[in-house]
C-alpha cells in the first residue's frame, strides 16, 4: 500500500510523461507536492522503486520509468500501447506472500501464529524459495539499516550461516530478528544497536525460522 504522498508523486510523474519520455525535475516534483526540500522527493522515489512502481534507468537524464500504477488509478488516454502492455505484465508478475504481524527488533515478543493478510511484491527482489513478511517492532537492528515500522521479507529456511540476519523462535514462545553467531556450542543473537546486549542461548532453545531476504520501507 502506498502513502498519500507516494501515490501523488507517482501519478504526477505518470501524467507529466504522457507526452514525452522525460520525467519532471526534482524541483518540479517538490513544488507539485508542496514539499520544502528535494530530500523528501528522494525518499518517496526510493520507496516507489522498492515497491516496483518506478524503475531507475541507468545512463539517462531524469532516468525514471513508471512500471505500474496504484490499483484503481486510471491510465491516461495518451499512454503508448507498449507502456500499457508493460504495466499489465508487471501487475500480473507480482508475487503474493503472507504477512505475519510484527517481529521484535528489541526484546523478543510473543510468537507469531496468525496470518494478517498478504503482501504483493516484485519477484525479482526475493528470488526463489518460500517467503513471508513481518513488520519490525523496535530499534535493535538500526545499524543494519532496519528501522521500526519497516517490512522485512524473510526466506523460510533453517540453513543459515554466521552473520546472517535471522528470525529466531526462542523457547518455542518468543520470536526476534537478530544477527546469528555460533560460539562454543551456544547460539548468540546479536543486535545491531549498541544500546542492546547479545542474547545467548543453548541450541535447544532456538529454532531458526528463516533469514532476511529483502526489506521494504514506507516514507511518510
Image (cartoon, grey):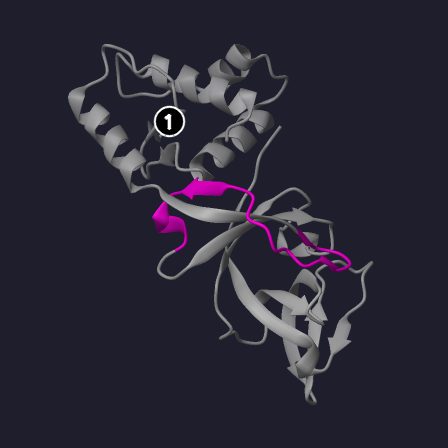
Above or below — where is 148 with respect to 9?
below
Rendered residue at 40%/19% (across/down) = 13
In the image, residue 12 lies at what x, y percent?
42, 15
User: The magenta stretch spans which residues?
Assistant: 103-126
In the image, residue 151 lies at what x, y percent?
57, 45
Q: Indicate whether residue 204 is drawn in magenta.
A: no
Above or below — where is 3 with respect to 192?
above
**Farthest-out residue, front:** 114
Q: Is residue 44 left or right of residue 179?
A: left
Q: Is residue 89 left or right of residue 33?
A: left
Q: Which residue is mark 1?
A: 62
Q: Is residue 48 left or right of residue 146?
A: left
Secondary structure under badge 1? Answer: loop
Above or below — where is 198 with respect to 25?
below
Q: Which of the 4 image quarters holds residue 168?
A: bottom right
In the image, residue 166 lies at what x, y percent?
59, 65
Bin the neighbour count of mark 1 within 10 Å (Cα to Cα): few under 14, some 14-19, many 20 and up. Answer: some
Rendered residue at 38%/62% (across/down) = 129
Residue 131 in sight here: yes
**Farthest-out residue, left:** 81
Residue in front for this viewpoint, 89 or 50 = 89
Rendered residue at 48%/69% (across/down) = 157
In the image, residue 101 lies at what x, y percent?
62, 47
Rendered residue at 16%/21% (across/down) = 81
Residue 24 in sight here: no
Above or below — where is 183 with respect to 140?
below
**Farthest-out residue, bottom:** 184
Quarter containing the C terminus: top right
Amino acid at each position: 500500500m502506498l502513502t498519500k504522498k507516494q501515490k501523488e508523486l507517482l501519478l504526477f510523474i505518470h501524467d507529466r510523461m504522457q507526452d514525452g519520455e522525460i520525467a519532471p525535475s526534482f524541483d518540479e516534483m517538490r513544488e507539485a507536492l508542496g514539499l520544502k526540500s528535494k530530500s523528501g522527493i528522494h525518499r518517496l522515489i526510493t520507496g516507489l522503486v522498492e515497491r516496483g512502481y518506478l524503475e531507475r534507468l541507468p545512463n539517462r537524464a531524469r532516468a525514471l520509468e513508471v512500471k505500474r500504477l496504484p490499483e484503481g488509478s486510471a491510465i491516461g488516454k495518451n499512454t503508448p500501447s507498449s507502456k500499457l502492455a508493460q504495466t499489465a505484465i508487471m501487475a500480473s508478475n507480482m508475487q503474493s506472500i503472507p504477512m505475519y504481524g510484527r517481529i521484535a527488533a528489541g526484546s523478543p515478543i510473543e510468537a507469531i501464529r496468525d496470518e494478517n493478510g498478504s503482501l504483493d511484491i516484485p519477484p525479482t527482489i526475493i528470488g526463489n524459495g518460500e517467503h513471508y513478511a513481518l513488520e519490525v517492532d523496535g530499534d535493535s537492528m538500526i545499524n543494519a539499516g532496519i528501522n521500526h515500522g519497516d517490512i522485512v521479507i524473510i526466506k523460510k529456511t533453517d540453513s543459515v550461516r554466521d552473520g546472517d540476519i535471522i528470525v529466531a523462535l526462542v523457547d518455542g514462545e518468543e520470536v526476534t530478528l537478530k544477527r546469528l553467531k555460533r560460539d562454543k556450542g551456544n547460539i548468540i543473537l546479536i543486535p545491531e544497536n549498541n544500546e542492546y546486549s547479545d542474547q545467548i542461548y543453548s541450541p535447544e532453545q532456538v529454532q531458526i525460522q528463516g533469514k532476511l531476504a529483502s526489506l521494504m520501507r514506507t516514507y511518510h
